[in-house]
Structures are given as C-alpha cells and as structure tokens.
Image (spheres, grey):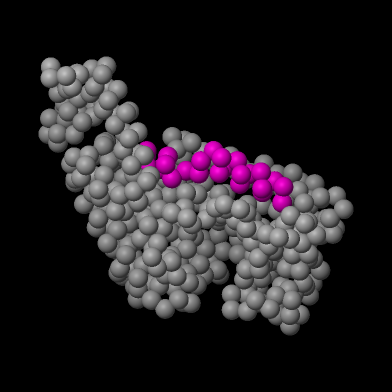
Amino acid sequence: MLVTASANHTLDTLLELLCIQLQLTKTQDSRVRDHYRAVTNWLAAEGSPLRGFSPHIFPQGSQRLGTTTKPVGHAEFDLDAVCKLILGPGCTPGELYSLIWDRLASNETYRKMMRRMPRCIRLDYAGDFHLDIAPAIPDETCGGNCILVPDLRADLSLLDPKNNSWKSTNPIDYAEWFEGKCVTAWVLEGNYARAQVDPVPETESIHAKPALKRSVQLFKRWRDVEYEQRPKLSPPSIILTTLSGHFYEGHQLCTDALQGILDTTVAELQATERLDLKNPAHPDEDICEKWDDVDGAYEDFCDSVVEFRDRFERLQSLRGLDVIQQELTELFGESPVESAIRSFVDQQISIPRTNGTLKMQSRSGLLVPATVSAPAISVRQNTFHGD
C-alpha cells in the first residue's frame, strides 16, 4: 500500500529543497540550450555535407529525461546528443565518425574544442560543460527507433576501414519508457523536414517534477559524492536510472519513492551473483558493461548501495534539524544541503513563527506548518528579546 501521509514531514520537505539545489542554475541551463542549438544548426545547415544524409539530431541521457544534477566540486556537467545519418549499406563506424568529425572541424571555433571519444565526439567548452555527440545510423536489423553507434571502447583507431564495431541502442524509446514510469505524458516537438533537430526539453520545476525523477537526481547525487575519490568505479547514470524506473512503486513522496527503490535494488543484488540489467527499450543491449570492464566495480556498487539503503532508512527516524543536516551532508554533500537547510528555515520555521502558524507535532516533536494534518500544538511567536 502506498504511503499518502508523511512519516517525517521535515525530511520530505528538505529532500524537495535539496532537489531544487541539484538543478542546473538558469545560467547553466541557458548555456546548454544555446550551445546545443548552435552545434545542431551547424551540423544540419543548408550547404552542410551532412544535409544529404537526412540528419536527425536529438538529445539523450539525463537532459532529455529531466534528471540532470549539478556536478560535485570541479567536475563538469554535460549534454549528450545523437546525430543520426541515413547512409548506404556497408558504411563503417570510422566512415560515419569521420563525416561528423570533419563537419565540426570545418568550424574554426569547434575545431579547437574537439576531442575523440570511444562512442562520441566531445566538445569541451570553457568552464564546466561539455557536449558529447554520438554519430549514429539506423539499426536496420532491430528496426524502429534503434540506432547503431561506433563501439570503440578499446580502440580509438576510428578511421581504420577494417574496424566494424557497432553498438545497438535505443535512447528515444528508453526515454519514453522512463516517462511512462513517471506516469506523465511528454511528447517531443519535432521538425520533420529533411534535416530534423529535436530541441532540448524544457526544464521542469521541482514542484512539477515527478517523484521518480527527483529520486533519480538524489540517487545520482549520492553516487557523485560517494565515488568522488574513486571515479573509475562509479556506476553510470543509466544503471541508476534504469534500476529506479524498474523498482519505482508509484510513491508521490520522494522519501518513500527512493527508499522503495533502494530496498528492491538491494534485494535484487543479494538474490543473484551478478545483476543482469538490460535496456528496457532494447532487451539485447547490456547497460552494465562497466561492471564487466572494470575490476571490482560491481562488488563496490553492491557494498555501497547497501550502505546507502541502510543510512537512508535510518535518516527517516532522525529528529532535530542539526542531526538531519549532518546525515544529509554526508550523503549528498555540504553545499546543496546547506542551501536546502537555509530555505527550509525560512519557509518552514522563520516565516510561520512570525505569522503564528508554526506548530509542533505532539508525538514526534517535529516542527511543521499548520497545513500539515497531524496532532500538534501551536508554537508562540518569539522575538528573541527575552520575551
């Protein structure tokens, strides 16, 4: 049965305020959109060599899903995009990669920013942002929205004509699967001309963002803090997002939603020798490659997520803002938690105390606004002048 009344209103509110702090700033969000628009316009412009291959450019990953979080420390945030071309049979990964690489390199600005990556071309912008563009062609074998991208994790000889390593994936249907799990409807607007460019989806406010998306943001933030000192073992976002989508039970309170996700994740990890996780929109795609490629990554994740589950469960029984703040800081980092606490004090304590609507729950001793439905006593106004 879903919980519809909060067992810890203070924590529920703090987690929502924390998610607000995890959102990209308006400046960061605007930068992402402006750079994405400029790059896609260059790739698909009239006169572009790519134009004859009906380019379809679209965002993928956390920006498309609405689960982007601010990076920890000096780490970069990113936008993932796909540039799909319609090429003839026999095209190799190197040939596809070169087409898009050469078009970007013909722009003096982008030429200075480009970096070869195993499955994408990276544009490094000054500051804290990079844009990853994955070259792609339709996957004629799987059909639908499936695409093939160069799969060159162990070999960056991208221009070798003998290299024929592809990876089949389906980011469009994955996004639709995830949105369905959120029990929301979202339809991308598209321009179905010869060149198609899908915009970056509008950023949802936290108050409109489903509990599943907020839970994924918290899950990812914990990951960033937990693995800051051992980044090679860090689980990819798609693993955390897929686990969350599979195990989300429809809770509307973020506390309950994340706890349910963690409980089921731990149960599944403990019930099998090695969790087999596929792309739900493309069952042939293994999204846990890192666990195979990096020694100890799977075992480290198992141990770390069990500890996270246990600590998050204990967090819900804590009372006292200072105690809750300390535990939240250890789990999610100092800066966003401090900001969330300041907002909480302003919204939930200082203002209600001033206008006489602050109450204390008689059983738990928690301070709550008068709007919370629970037995409580009024907290009288305090001017802090000895009255």
- In the displayed structure, 67 sits above or below 111; it is above
Q: Is residue 77 located in the magenta-colored stretch of the structure?
A: no
Question: Can you name the residue that lies furthest to the front here?
Answer: 385
On screen, residue 269 versus residue 178, left or right, reads left
Front-lying residue, 326 or 7: 326
Identify the residue at horizontal 78%, vertical 75% (top origin).
Answer: 90
Identify the residue at horizontal 25%, vertical 48% (top origin).
Answer: 326
- In the displayed structure, 258 sits above or below 119; it is above
Q: Is residue 31 located in the magenta-colored stretch of the structure?
A: yes
Identify the residue at horizontal 68%, vertical 62% (top origin).
Answer: 114
Please tell me how many numbered marks the rendered image carries. Answer: 0
On screen, residue 369 versus residue 22, left or right, reads left
Residue 332 locus on image (x, y percent): 35, 51
Front-lying residue, 257 or 22: 22
The rendered magenta stretch, by its main secondary structure, is classed as helix
Front-lying residue, 294 or 210: 294
On screen, residue 331 versus residue 69, left or right, reads left
Residue 205 locus on image (x, y percent): 48, 36
Residue 9 locus on image (x, y percent): 26, 36
Q: Is residue 196 visible?
A: no
Question: Can you name the residue that lies furthest to the bottom here?
Answer: 162
Identify the residue at horizontal 28%, vertical 57% (top origin).
Answer: 309
Front-lying residue, 123 or 19: 123
Which segment did they paint magenta? 16-39
- In the displayed structure, 328 sits above or below 108; it is above
On screen, residue 217 versus residue 343, left or right, reads right
Q: Quadrant of the N terminus?
A: top left
Q: Quadrant of the C terminus?
A: top left
Q: Is residue 353 visible?
A: yes
Q: Quadrant of residue 270?
A: bottom left
Residue 179 locus on image (x, y percent): 51, 47
